[in-house]
Amino acid sequence: MEAAVMHSALVTGTGLMGTSVALALRAHDVTVHLRDVDSTALRTAASLGAGTVQAPTEVVDLAIVAVPPPLVGRVLADIQAEGLARHYTDVASVKVEPQHDAIALDCDTSQYIGGHPMAGASRSGPLTARADLFEGRMWALTPTADTDTETLNMALELVALCGAVPVLMQAAAHDRAVALVSHAPHVVASLVAMRLEHAEEREVSLAGPGLRDLTRIAEADPGLWLDILSANAGAVADLLEEVRSDLDRTVVGLRAIAATDEAKRRSGTEVVESMLRKGRSGRARISGKHGTQPERFEVVAVAIGDQPGELARLFADVERAGINIEDVRIEHATSQLTGLVHVSVAPCLAVPLKEALQARGWRLR
């Protein structure tokens, strides 16, 4: 399959996703035209170097629709009616609804392919955009029944220019998958975080990195997520029904553990232990870099002060030791100006890293 070459693009919607796509394309010298009904967002994206607000004078190679899922079909129909591009795609987080809307609105679906980069941030808007937002991330492509090969090639070129990894899926399969790995977890994280809203300050002060990790995604824009969940409500509801069933069994198990009857305690322990083991097994299936099989790393915990430049100094010392950091997590102390940096490295490099850091004066935990 011969790769397409992209010289020009139109990005409609200059929020986080659209502006990030535009910045990534501009980094490869693609001419990018920007369009948005929000003039402030449009000007902001242009000022960041994401492209020009001038309308294209010639047909562009690819139009990228970066608007909320309920609007994709209408925007696609309007752009196609203007004849602005040779090929069309979108970056909405659900795919069945936009595809159905495109068909219902008589769009030319041979020149359209759905797309969803698996990347984002807790905050929206062009100011949060980054050219490297999609690097190493999976990017689902969902062809219609008649998507043309040239359109698929152009979408693959877009994914490549953004540094992402393409995955071809049917729209319905995509929506079931993102309900499992993204949408339902967001609801669960929000439910857990919701319990903190009226908790006593003393209780919340005990929160550690586990709770922060679990609830981080609950920081996202509620309006944006209402659009996402509304467009995939059925699949998300089905999964949450399963979670509710599992939760009910777990509650029964915990009640049994709290009982005085030894047989009930043993029965409850088996239920809860099974849940914990299955959870651990499921967690181990989450892929590693670039969708590869998960790898096991060893964590080196380094105590770090709150002085400016401390984190940069730590990373520089790790680099001087010739060791690649596979992952990093920062644990902030609640009442002190210190924290722990958990550096994940290949198991064979943990001891050399510890020795190198201790030699440079770092305190390990």
Image (cartoon, grey):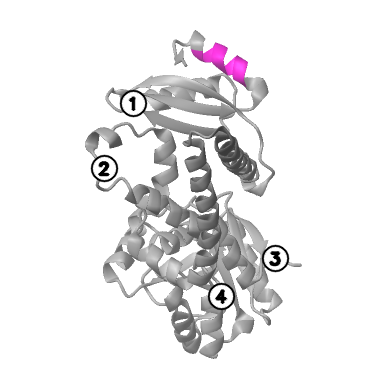
- Residue 197 placement, left or right of 116: left
How much space separates mark 1 and mark 3, taking CA atoms? 50 Å
3D distance between C-alphas at marks 4 and 1:
44 Å
Residue 333 image label: 1
Q: CA distance from mark 3 to mark 4?
A: 27 Å
The residue wearing badge 2 is: 199
SS for callout 3: loop
Q: CA distance from mark 3 to mark 2?
A: 56 Å
Whole-percent x, y for residue 363 in the image: 44, 13
Q: Nearer the viewer, mark 1 or mark 2?
A: 2
Q: Residue at x 38, y 32 (%)?
A: 208
Q: CA distance from mark 4 to mark 2?
A: 39 Å
The answer to whether residue 57 is visible is: no
Q: Amino acid at mark 1?
A: Ala
In magenta, the rendered stretch is 350-357
Counting residues from the start of the chain, the first of labels 3 and 2 encountered is 3
Of mark 3 and mark 4, the one earlier in the sequence is: 3
- Residue identified by numbered label 4: 96
Q: Which residue occupies the foreground of this view, 354 or 360?
A: 354
Q: Which mark is first along the chain, 2 or 4?
A: 4
SS at mark 1 in the image: loop
Number of other residues with Cα within 10 Å of mark 3, as a class: few under 14, some 14 to 19, many 20 or more: few
Residue 3 - label = 3
Q: Position of residue 117 (x, y in %)?
A: 54, 60
